[in-house]
Image (cartoon, rainbow, N blue to C red):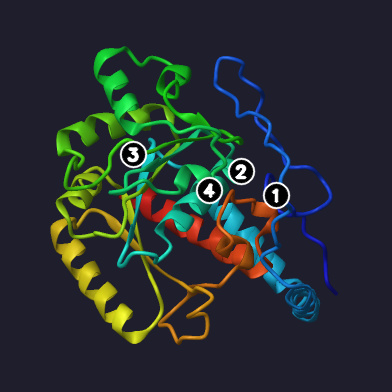
Amino acid sequence: MRTSTAPSRGFPGMGANAPLLPPSNPSVPQPPAAPAGPVRKSGDTWWERLRFEVTDAVTSGALSERLIRASSAVEAPITTGRRIVVLGTAGGAGTTTVTALLARLLGSIRQEPVIAVDATDHYGSLLQYLGAAHSTPLTALMQQFRTQPVRILPDAVSNAAACGNQVFATGRSDVPALADAPIALQEWTDVSSTLSRFMSVTVVDGGSSPLSRHAAALLATAHAVVLVSPPGNPEASKAASIRDSLAKEFPDVQQVPVVVRSRQNHDLATAGDAFPFDRHLAEGGTLQLRRLGFRSRIAATELTGKALMAANRA
């Protein structure tokens, strides 16, 4: 006989109860109300949603139970602030999408302060994906940490954009190219250690040059790296080679590989688990967890749990 199990608290769109929200803190910047705009697609078509419901019913709620277990992994206790760097094996692999998903899910399920950092070598889309109302240069945050005392959470996020659910974001929109201004090791060490004093997790979009000097600076203080690659045999070989190189240079950084499917390569064979193609994510723009497809929701939550557990082992 199938029994109903309540989903883990705080996961948007699951169950009849509204997600629990952290108490309002007037001293911490709050995101402005989102302007009205076109309704974005759900990640699943109506046929896919029906198929999911039928499959879940036939398997006695196995898929729902899988989501609940994944959410529990995201809620697991952690030690000090964890730092997770997301790197891609190629441009367009999905590093920014994965970074935004990790930050959104951590902030929604754990309901503790989380910061997402766009540390790519160009003007990225991370802040847009997270719904930030304005650009917040990472250089301004670094300058603040060098020149002003940082004693409480509002100090740490005064130069970051509030994105809701205790998620904050900052980026490198003022840096035109990696060759012009790569992040220095000592500079990043100082800022990442300061963020970890106030944030449960710092999630960093490191771009698509995993073996560069820029990525090395980010990985020097990381607890875990999520390595994102497209499907296909050539990409799998490339990803394996990169993982070997990173393991030799950063043996203490735990690795979490993920293959992200796109509209063009959603049917290519992959080794191991892959993140499914999702219409909502493919549209770009602000990420809304409630619009994720059911399988995307499970995959994203499982990936977030794996990344957090890996970071906690470091």
Q: Determine whether 215 is above or below 89 in the image.
A: above
Q: Quadrant of the N terminus?
A: bottom right
Q: Determine whether 55 is above or below 22 in the image.
A: below
Kindly indicate whether the residue at mark 2 contacts the one at mark 1 (C-beta within 8 angstroms): yes
Front residue of 138 and 306: 138
Which of pointers 3 and 2 indicates the residue nearer the eye? Answer: 3
Amino acid type of the residue that numbered disc 2 sits on in the rendered structure: Ser
Amino acid type of the residue that numbered disc 1 sits on in the rendered structure: Pro
Q: Position of residue 21 (x, y in %)?
A: 68, 34
In the rendered image, which quarter is residue 116 located in? top left
Return the residue at label 4. Answer: 129
Kindly indicate whether the residue at mark 2 contacts the one at mark 3 (C-beta within 8 angstroms): no
Disc 4 to disc 2, C-alpha distance: 15 Å
Front residue of 120 and 295: 120
Which of pointers 4 and 2 indicates the residue nearer the eye? Answer: 4
Kindly indicate whether the residue at mark 4 contacts the one at mark 1 (C-beta within 8 angstroms): no
Return the residue at label 1. Answer: 12
Q: Position of residue 99 (x, y in %)?
A: 44, 52
Q: Position of residue 254 (x, y in %)?
A: 30, 57
Return the residue at label 2. Answer: 108
Return the residue at label 3. Answer: 172
